[in-house]
Amino acid sequence: MTDTSRIPDKPALEGLETVWADAWERDGVYTFPRADATRETIYSIDTPPPTASGSLHIGHVFSYTHTDVMARFQRMRGRKVFYPMGWDDNGLPTERRVQNYYGVRCDPTLPYEPDFVPPFEGGDGKSTKAADQKPISRRNFIELCERLTVEDEKQFEALWRTLGLSVDWKQSYRTIADEAIFTSQLAFVRNVERGEAYQALAPTLWDVTFRTAVAQAELEDREQPGHYHRVSFHRTDSGTIEIETSRPELIAACVALVAHPDDERYQPLFGTTVTSPVFGVEVPVLAHHLAQKDKGTGIAMICTFGDVTDVVWWRELDLPNRAIVGFDGRIIAEAPEAITSEAGRAAFAEIAGKTAFSAKAAVVDLLRASGDLLGEPKAITHPVKFFEKGDRPLEIVSTRQWYISNGARDAGLKERLLEHGRGIDWHPDFMRVRYENWVGGLSGDWLVSRQRFFGVPIPVWYPLDEAGDPKFDEPIVATRDILPVDPSSAPAPGFDEAQRGAPGGFIGEHDVMDTWATSSLTPQLAGGWERDPELFDLVYPYSLRPQGQDIIRTWLFSSTLRAELEHGTAPWKNAAISGFIVDPDRKKMSKSKGNVVTPAGLLEQHGSDAVRYWAASSRLGTDASFDPQNPTQVKIGRRLAIKVLNAAKFILGFEGAADAAVTEPVDRSMLAELAEVVAKATKSLESYDHARALELSETFFWTFCDDYLELVKERAYGEPSAEQASAVAALKTALAVLLRLFAPVIPFATEEVWSWSNEGSVHHAAWPTLDELAARGEAGTELLVISSLALTGIRRAKTAAKASQKTPVTRAVIAAPAATVALLTAVASDLRAVGRIAELEFVEADEFEVRDIELETPEA
């Protein structure tokens, strides 16, 4: 029997988040039960670690709810759920936030100030000029990064708890903590030992604003306005060759002209030389299949380096390097050695120190003056490569960087990575193609070094020769026993600190790892790889990797790569890919577009269950529109959660036990219908289709409340009898099943209701099965459908007569086909009671119809 004293007089959603979040934490409801776990009983989740810089947005709520629904479902299925949470707190976003928040910038040449106080605290996050930021030492800067990320993470965790994520907070990690640095450095050291990580001096995509190298996965093309300039190069026979270029400022860096080998116009010139305009450098005319006969004049200049195609030509044609763009995006001061004429060197002096934009204008003026600019520049729009977080076009400069082999130059590795992609179950399956396309389109190994400050140090030193010059080809790689280590402050093995920078001594590597080089190891970080072997063997390979579609090429691919290199396996069995959140104009929400919605206000106004319902209503891989001014789905979710509270209060108020015999056909029909819902919803969740499971459960719930509950409530209110007990048992049984079906989506309302009549948490209750309903629901589902139809007909007849639904009816006739009439006789008493019908007659007819309603006339 239900203890009605537990049921509040006026159930409400307000405050449930605090009450139950505290209870769940106190009772350890979501603690990973490691003690009695086996690999077969565990469901492990490689949860995305959100970037701890700034604030979470509605897209986080969207995708993390999808994961939490699955975690809760699997927990109720009896699995031991390993559900950690990480914080991605190193990298560029954190540095930018610290710069703006505290008004500082890092200058590694400055000494450490032990009692440093930043100029201000609490910047608005808008970009500030470097000149307005106080320069501080690297150590001071890192301390500020540490301080701010810890505070941000506290706020993030509070929001996740409010949202109801069933995370085990004892399993959290930070990507900049000592354990994460150890794991990242150990994996890198092993990559070096196996020859998978290497150092090279090579052309590198470079962001001149952030002064850092950029990997292929971090690029994006943006359409930019520009101009084509037709320029003449001088042949040895006094003729000219005309080329078209959008970057005339790089003519000083030209090392060759190139045309397609089949282009008859230029075949006679292959092997000859021409002289560059203005700078007077002799360069060869060469053939290469990447040259486009139908682009411009069909012949192009190769510069070091204007774009990635220049890099390919430079490498494959074995050309010299005459790079002229510096790390700051300006033309370097010293002219290339190939410029030997006085006029050429004078021309270079006019562009030295200028930005690429200003140098372009200067070179165009020089070309006009020499007569080598043919016609006026022609306006164009063309794609230009940017760092995804940058504001200025990328340059290509020559730098010494660290790389990890990724299959671009290793066909065997590439095939193994593709095979892992085929072995993972993708949800939805079409997302697999994005992974395969990325792997197939790789053009170079993974550049993992970054010229930043707040990150995992690359654990390498370089010996110095007797002249004090570094021997880059003889790196000193850290050994496991000294990890984690920062080579910028710790001496190299076999040396002491006094030898740093001295001839015959050493220097430490100042670069840090790309943040993806750490994030790619989240399965190892969370699972305790090489720190807790027992735990790692329990959870790896993981059951699930949930993530957004936009980071398949970065996080998903790099994680698969590191797993293959270290373990020879795929890191997970399933990949669940969420769609984007788009605004009412169907534009993706992003901070850069200024259309991001933060979730705190939404959660406070509508409640967490309502917001979770909105998120769970969208299928994986499908973009969801969100209008903060009219969040329709959120409101529907709130209505559902409130209805669960109120319907439960109503049902639990009936006298009777849930385990009594269910004898009446309509009660058994309802439970049969519910059994079908359980079967279909379970199958949907097993297929990672949470939206379909919610749709099935919700559709049944509203029919249950609006039709079945109304149909049998008079019987349930009645005097004790087998019929009354049947109604109450069916209602309470259905309620218990529905609470468990809804628990993964609306955990607060369902936990509240569950507590009114049960011990323990609904989130530890067993997921409903056919077995618990089969014996009670043998009547088939047709009777429930027909009963609902009849009840609706009676209601409509009263409405048509402009009468209240409480108005008594003297007589009513329901016409229906013979088979339907036979079924309706089983619910005649319920229909008479709910419709307040004194005499109810059934007649056979071709069509279903409620007719001949005679309303009781009030006495005068």
Image (cartoon, rainbow, N blue to C red):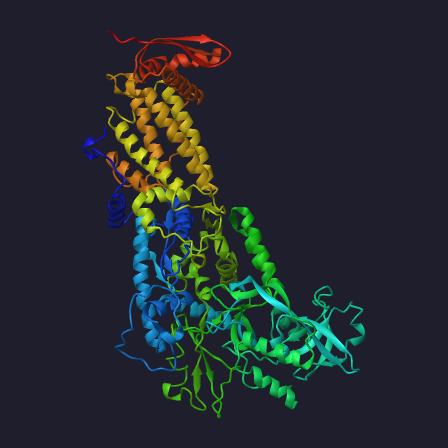
Count of marks overlaid on the render: 0
Q: Quadrant of residue 203?
A: bottom right
Q: Residue at x 24, y 45 (%)?
A: 19
Q: Identify the residue at the far left of this view.
A: 5
Instruction: Tell whether 257 sits left or right of 159.
Output: right
Tell me where residue 271 appears, x and y as whole percent.
77, 78
User: Between residues 841 and 359, which one lies in front from this camera angle?
Assistant: 359
Q: Is residue 97 above or below residue 673?
A: below
Res. 35 visible in picture: no
Tell me where residue 284 appears, x and y as whole percent.
72, 79
For the C terminus, the image quarter is: top left
Tell me where residue 208 appears, x and y as whole percent.
49, 73
User: Between residues 381 and 716, which one lies in front from this camera angle?
Assistant: 381
For the N terminus, the image quarter is: top left
Res. 173 visible in picture: yes
Instruction: Tell whether 303 sits left or right of 561.
Output: right
Q: Quadrant of residue 332?
A: bottom right
Q: Residue at x 40, y 67 (%)?
A: 127
Instruction: Tell whether 554 sits left or right of 95.
Output: right
Q: Residue at x 26, y 26 (%)?
A: 657
Q: Residue at x 73, y 77 (%)?
A: 285
Q: Identify the residue at the far bottom of this view.
A: 466
Tell me where residue 307 appears, x and y as whole percent.
60, 70
Q: Is residue 156 above or below residue 229?
A: above
